[in-house]
Image (spheres, rainbow, N blue to C red):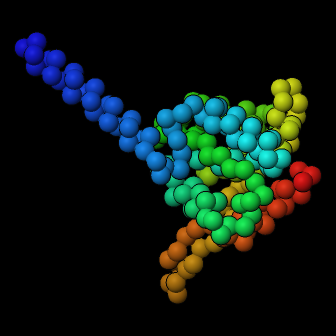
Amino acid sequence: MKNLILTLMIAASFQAVTAQADDCKPGRVFNTCVDQTTLYEQGLARAKAAQKPLVVLFGFESCGWCQSLHKIFSDPQFTAGKDFEFVQIAAYDKGEKLPSGIAVLLGVLDAAGQDRKSVQGFPFLEVIRPSTAEAGQKLEAFPKDTGLLEENTMNEAGKVTKAGHSRAKVEEFLYEARRSLGY
């Protein structure tokens, strides 16, 4: 009986480690194996060093719209990409709120003096002036409801046949944010 219990415990531990390893595989948009605060701080440091605005994409791995924006941001032909630094912050993992991701989101909203109710869903974008991300200083940030960046193709029956974000609308928003932040 002891051997059976020990075997079951080892098998359960292996399953948990394997599930976590799957979450940490390269190719995922949202790295939930790292504290999201650390990812955010690293993004701020990169943006500050490069003297570029930081685009923060809040979302989660199973969000198709989050994947759509990431696909645009990571495309080498996305010309706006050279003028910004990017970081993806996971707000959820496996259907559960990810505390460190939610903390980053709420921290950004609060530091920028933005209403927490302005986040109507995910993905949610903030473009941040990293030099204003010092403790006690009001964060200069430019939020965006990404629903306004969508471009859907409909058939004659009015059904969506292709859903995604408009590259042109995304670029227009990013450059508007950049100008607003004084770049």
Residue found at x 63% / y 37%: 39
The image shows residue 162 at horizontal and vertical percentages of 52, 74
Residue found at x 52% / y 87%: 156
Residue situated furthest top in the rendering: 2
The image shows residue 94 at horizontal and vertical percentages of 44, 41
Q: Nearer the viewer, residue 152 or 37?
A: 37
Q: Exactly how many numbered labels are in the figure?
A: 0
The image shows residue 62 at horizontal and vertical percentages of 47, 51
Residue situated furthest front in the rendering: 49
Residue 27 shows up from this direction = yes
The image shows residue 41 at horizontal and vertical percentages of 70, 34
**Where does the C terminus fall, quadrant-wise?**
bottom right
Would residue 28 be found to the left or right of residue 117 on screen? left
Residue found at x 58% / y 40%: 91
Q: State which quadrant residue 151 falls in.
A: bottom right
Would residue 136 be found to the left or right of residue 152 on screen? right
Residue 117 shows up from this direction = no
Residue found at x 86% / y 38%: 131
Residue situated furthest right in the rendering: 182
Q: Is residue 160 above or below residue 156?
A: above
Residue situated furthest left in the rendering: 1
Q: State which quadrant residue 154 falls in.
A: bottom right
Would residue 56 be found to the left or right of residue 91 on screen? right
Would residue 5 be found to the left or right of residue 150 on screen? left
**Where does the N terminus fall, quadrant-wise?**
top left
Q: Is residue 133 above or below residue 164?
A: above
